[in-house]
Image: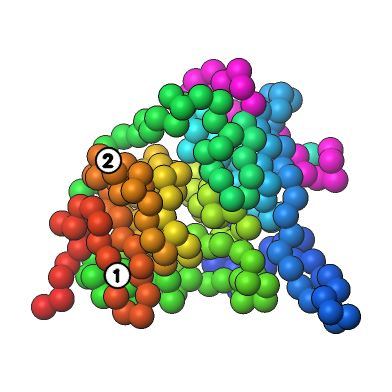
C-alpha cells in the first residue's frame, strides 16, 4: 500500500495534533505529553490496548501488528469514531491466528502484555549484511533526531529511521519508547518500505529487549540508542546478528554486538 504521508510529514518539525496538553503548574501554564489508551481491532474484534501519545495511530497499529508477526501483505488501517477516536480498525491478511489472550501494554513496557513467556520468542528473517557505517556517524545520530514534542515537554521518547549516510528518513515521538518504534515501523509498512535492510534505527533512550525485537523483525541491521542496553537486549542482538550500539552521545558510542558493520576511525 502506498503511504499517504509525504517525506516532510515523516520528518515533522511540529508535534502531532493532540500530542500535547496544557495544564496548570505552580499557578502557571505548562505543556505535558498526552497519554491515552488506543484500542486496536482486527475485523471488528479488539486484540490490543496500548497506552500511547495520540498521533500517527494508524502507523502505531500497523507497526505493532508487524512486530507481533500478525500481518502479511497490504493493510487497510483507519481510525473509528468509537471511544473519542481512540480506536483503530485494521483490515488485511493475517499471517497467523490472533492469540486468544488480548494484548495490553503500558507506555513503559513493550512486552508486559504477553500472556506467556514463550510468546516473547522472536521470529524474524535473517538480517541484511550491511550497511557498514563509520563509528563517528553512529555517534552523531541522536543529535540528528527531530524531537519537537520532547523539546516542549521533556516527556516523549523518539525513534528515527536513517539511511546509511545518516540522513533522517522518518521520526516519531511517543510517551512509550516501544510505541515510537512501532510508529516508525508502521510508517515503513504502510509505505511499502519493509524490510529495513540497509537502514539504521536510532532511539532516544535505553535499549531494551523489545526494541531489539521490533528492530530485528522490521529487518533493520543496526540499532543505536542514547542510553544503556539491558543484558537481554545484548544477548538477543548477538543471537540475531544485529549491530547494537549504546551510549551514543558526545561524539562517542559503545558497540556491543556485530561490530563488523562499524567502520573504525582511520
199 in relation to 147, above or below: above
* Residue in the picture at 69% in, 55% down: 53
Numbered mark located on residue 240 in the image:
2
Q: Nearer the viewer, mark 2 or mark 1?
A: 1
- Residue 208 or residue 77, whichever sits in front: 208
Q: State the CA–CA distance, disc 2 to disc 1.
A: 21 Å
222 in relation to 89, above or below: below
* SS at circle 1: strand
* Residue in the picture at 40% in, 30% down: 121
Number of residues whose C-alpha sits closer than 10 Å to that of mark 1, classed few (under 14), some (14–19) or many (20 or more): many
Q: Is residue 92 magenta?
A: yes
Numbered mark located on residue 103 in the image:
none
Q: Quadrant of residue 75?
A: top right
Name the image quarter holding the N terminus.
Answer: top right
Give how far across and how far down residue 188 sits, in percent. Answer: 48, 49
Give how far across and how far down residue 140 sits, in percent. Answer: 35, 75
- 236 sits left or right of 157 in the view: left
Q: Is residue 195 visible?
A: no
- Residue 195 or residue 263, whichever sits in front: 263
Give how far across and how far down residue 264 sits, in percent. Answer: 15, 70
Read off the magenta span.
82-102
Numbered mark located on residue 253 in the image:
1
Amino acid at each position: 500500500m502506498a503511504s499517504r504521508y509525504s517525506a516532510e510529514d515523516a520528518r515533522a518539525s511540529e508535534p502531532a495534533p493532540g500530542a500535547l496538553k496544557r495544564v496548570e503548574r505552580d499557578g502557571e501554564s505548562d505543556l505535558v505529553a498526552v497519554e491515552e489508551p488506543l484500542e486496536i481491532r482486527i475485523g471488528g474484534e479488539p486484540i490490543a490496548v496500548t497506552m500511547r501519545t495520540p498521533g500517527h495511530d494508524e502507523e502505531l497499529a500497523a507497526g505493532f501488528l508487524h512486530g507481533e508477526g500478525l500481518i502479511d501483505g497490504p493493510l487497510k488501517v483507519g481510525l473509528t469514531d468509537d471511544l473519542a477516536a481512540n480506536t483503530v480498525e485494521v483490515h488485511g491478511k493475517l499471517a497467523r491466528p490472533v492469540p486468544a489472550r488480548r494484548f495490553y501494554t503500558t507506555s513503559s513496557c513493550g512486552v508486559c502484555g504477553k500472556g506467556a513467556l514463550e510468546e516473547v520468542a522472536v521470529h524474524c528473517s535473517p538480517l541484511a549484511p550491511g550497511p557498514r557505517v563509520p563509528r563517528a556517524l553512529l555517534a552523531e545520530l541522536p543529535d540528528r533526531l527531530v524531537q519537537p514534542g520532547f523539546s516542549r515537554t521533556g516527556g516523549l521518547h523518539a525513534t528515527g529511521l536513517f539511511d546509511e549516510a545518516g540522513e533522517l528518513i522518518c521520526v516519531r515521538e511517543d510517551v512509550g519508547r516501544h510505541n515510537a518504534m512501532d510508529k516508525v515501523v508502521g510508517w515503513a509498512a504502510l509505505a511499502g518500505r519493509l524490510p529495513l535492510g540497509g537502514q539504521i534505527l536510532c532511539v532516544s533512550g535505553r535499549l531494551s529487549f523489545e526494541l531489539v525485537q521490533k528492530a530485528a523483525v522490521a529487518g533493520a541491521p543496526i540499532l543505536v540508542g542514547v542510553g544503556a542496553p539491558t543484558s537481554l537486549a545484548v544477548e538477543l542482538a548477538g543471537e540475531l546478528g544485529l549491530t547494537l550500539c549504546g551510549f551514543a552521545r558526545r561524539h562517542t558510542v559503545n558497540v556491543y554486538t556485530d561490530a563488523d558493520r562499524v567502520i573504525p576511525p582511520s
